[in-house]
Image (spheres, rainbow, N blue to C red):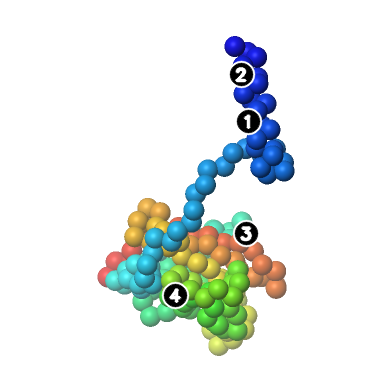
Amino acid sequence: MKRAILFLVILVSGLIFAQTGQLQPIKPSIPFTPLLTTTIKESQLIGLYGSAWKIYWDGWEGTLVLLKGGKGYIEVSGTRYDLEYVILKNPQDNVVGMTGPGYTGKNTNLGHRIVFMVDFARTPTNKSDDQRFDGYVFTQTIDNASKRAMAGITWWDGIPFGFYATYWSDVPG
C-alpha cells in the first residue's frame, strides 16, 4: 500500500512538473469575471448624507468621512484634516494631472475610482501641498456593507505608499 501511494505521489508530481516546467502546487482555475454590469452609483459609496470609513496608510490610521458634494475630512487622533474628493471616475480619467494607478491603457466604465486630496498642512488656499490618495472601490462587494472597501496608493514627498479603507457607517442626516 505504501508503495502504491508513493508511486501515485511521484506520478502526480511528474505530471505537474511536466506541465509547468517547475514543481508547484496545483491551483484551482478561478476565472475573474466582474459581476458589476453598470457603473457604481454615488448612493452606493456616499449614502444619503455621507459615509465614514476606517482608513490605514503606511502605519497611520484614522477615520475617513466623505460628505455629499465632494468634501470631507480625515480624523487622526482627534484632529480633523479637510479633504476634497472626486468619485465615479475611471482609470483612464485624468484627475489633477494623473490617470489612475495601474492604468494599462484598457478603458473601463465601472466608475470605481476615487481620488481625494487631504490638506494635512492646513493651508486651504494652497492645494499644491495636499496629499493625494488615488484608488479603487471594490466592485464585487459594493452592495455588502460588511465587505465594502477601497484600496490604492498615496504619495508623501514624491514616494508612493499603500492605503486601504473599510466602510464603517453612513453619516446620519
Q: Which residue in the protein does label 4 denote?
A: 109
- How far is disc 1 from disc 4 in space, using C-alphas? 44 Å
Q: Residues within 10 Å of mark 3 (few under 14, many from 20)?
A: few
Label 4 element class: loop
User: Which of the two residues, 26 or 90, is positioned nearer the viewer here?
Assistant: 26
> In the image, 41: left or right of 105?
left
Label 3 element class: loop
Q: Residue at x 36, y 73 (%)?
A: 42
- How far is disc 2 from disc 4 in space, using C-alphas? 52 Å
N-term-proximal mark, 4 vs 3: 3
Q: Residues within 10 Å of mark 1 (few under 14, many from 20)?
A: few
Q: State if disc 3 and disc 4 touch (CB < 8 Å).
A: no
Residue extending furthest toward the left: 173
N-term-proximal mark, 1 vs 4: 1
Q: Residue at x 64, y 25 (%)?
A: 9
Instruction: Residue 167: tell me if it is visible.
Output: no
- How far is disc 3 from disc 1 in space, using C-alphas? 43 Å
Q: Which residue in the protein does label 1 denote?
A: 12
Instruction: Say what amino acid the circle numbered 1 marks.
Output: Val
Residue extending furthest toward the right: 21
Please provide percent x and percent y for residue 101.
Answer: 59, 70
Label 2 element class: helix
Q: Which residue in the protein does label 3 denote?
A: 58
Q: Is residue 147 above or below residue 24?
A: below
Please provide percent x and percent y for residue 1.
Answer: 59, 11
Query: Residue 5, which numbered label?
Result: 2
> In the image, 26: left or right of 30?
right
- How far is disc 2 from disc 1 in space, using C-alphas? 11 Å
Residue extending furthest toward the top: 1
Q: Residue at x 29, y 66 (%)?
A: 172
Instruction: Say what amino acid the circle numbered 4 marks.
Output: Asn
Query: Residue 159, which numbered label?
Result: none
